[in-house]
Image: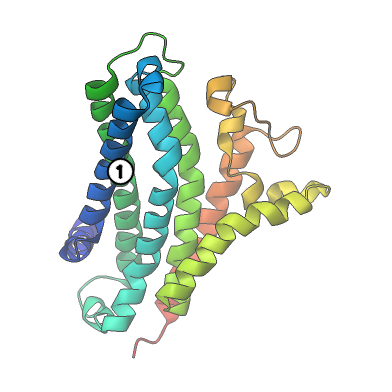
Amino acid sequence: MTLFSLMANEIMKINSKRQSWNFFVFLFVAVLAIGLTVALFITQLAESIGYRSFTGFMITGLEFFILIFAVVIGAQIFTDEYKDGTIKQLLIRPASRSAVLLSKYLTILLMMLLAYAVLIVSAIVIGLVLFGNNPSDALSLGQLLKSVLYSLPGTIFIMTVSFFLGVVIKSLGLAISIAVVANFGGTLITSFLGRYSWSKYIVFANLNMSVYDKDPAVSGGGSPFMPGMTFGFSLTVVLLYILALYLLANLIFAKRDIQ
């Protein structure tokens, strides 16, 4: 089987549970509900914003739900196979375990990017209908897209953590819990270790990449974790952690005895 065939099979399995479509509907309904609330009941705010500012608010407010969505499907895509016993049927097909693992990982990544697209497009369309194009908007579409791009490596890393845990421990609840705790606790622990020069190599010290943008509207006035750190350095660190987790998951899955 080709990689695309394996991915199509994974997408079909995800869609059969209607999990992703329910989440996409949730994003649209949430954006619509917030937009209508502002337009009907917070008129002073509604008169001062346009669709770009509204889209920025929606990305900031709802991006966390996309992270949780990515964590859940990242862990679930393997743990459900173990629980239902379908992992055996998957592995008897003419495809290597590495190809199976890659197809699942790319499918999760595709679903996460699709969730971002649904959020952004919904916010832009609903924002245009309810608030129009306000020339005084502080944000441009370019700035909005940059803010999303800066957040993607961090979201992909946490998603990869849940994916790795789903492969290793087979428990959906535990995999999700550890990934979510790591997302919140990692940054806190890193801040305590900030006095050590080597702490800049901890992945959580590099997840907030918007601080490297020269535009205050994008960076929020933030600064790098340590002086001298650059966007290239942080991106490289995050990508190396993602690659290490993926390769380790691949190694464990390749050697695992499937009963």
Residue 181 appears in the picture as rendered:
yes
Answer with the quarter of the image where residue 118 lies: top left
Task: Give neighbour class at mark 1: few <14, some 14-19, many 20+ (Cα, 10 Å).
Answer: some
Residue closest to the eye, 54 or 168? 54
Please identify the quadrant where the C terminus is shown. bottom left
Toward the front, the furthest residue is: 41
Q: Which residue is drawn at 26% across and 82% down?
A: 84
Which residue, given by chain and number where applicable, does mark 1 sit on? 30
Residue closest to the eye, 179 or 22? 22
Answer with the quarter of the image where residue 53 lies: top left
Answer with the quarter of the image where residue 48 lies: top left
Where residue 96 appears, x then y in whole percent?
30, 71
| Position above or below: 128 against 22 | above
Residue closest to the eye, 68 or 248? 68
Q: Is mark 1 on a helix, strand or loop?
A: helix
Q: Residue at x 36, y 29 (%)?
A: 55
Toward the top, the furthest residue is: 135
Toward the right, the furthest residue is: 195
Where residue 4 appears, x then y in whole percent?
21, 56
Where residue 63 appears, x then y in whole percent?
42, 43
